[in-house]
Image (spheres, rainbow, N blue to C red):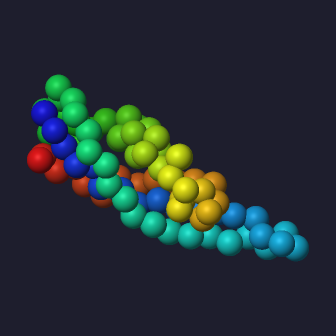
Amino acid sequence: MEYTLKFNFTTLKVGRGGSIKGGNGGGECDITTDYPLDELKTKTDDLKSIAYGSLVDNTKVKKMGSIQSIDIVDVVAR
């Protein structure tokens, strides 16, 4: 089955002079799995790992800083 994973994330970046800047963003990615939707929604840690994997190589996110947290907003069947 195919799903769209929607999530929010927070980043932190150390600036000049030791200042710390934070940023927030939202994202989504498409996933394919054999799990039914109800069971997939219970696998929060796995979903966060998938979301992290979709962000880690994104150049816009890299400019925002390092990823500090990810919150799953929704999983929707496509």
In this rendering, position of residue 42 left or right of residue 78: right
Residue at the extreme front: 59
Task: From the viewer's side, name the closer residue of 45 and 13.
Answer: 13
Q: Is residue 48 visible?
A: no
Q: Residue 75 appears at what percent x and percent y?
A: 22, 49
Q: Position of residue 32 (x, y in %)?
A: 22, 34
Tell me if 20 is positioned left or right of 65 in this view: right
Q: Where residue 22 appears, x then y in whole percent?
A: 62, 70
- Looking at the picture, tell me which residue is in the foreground, 39 or 54: 54
Q: Find residue 66 and report its image quarter.
A: bottom right
The residue drawn where x is 74% and y is 70% is 20
Residue name at image x 31 percent, y 36 percent: 43
Residue 75's place in the image compared with 60, above or below, is above
Q: Nearer the viewer, residue 61 or 73?
A: 61
Q: Is residue 14 above or below residue 48?
A: below
The answer to whether residue 62 is seen in the rendering is: yes
Q: Quadrant of residue 28?
A: bottom left
Residue 46 appears at what percent x and percent y?
A: 38, 35
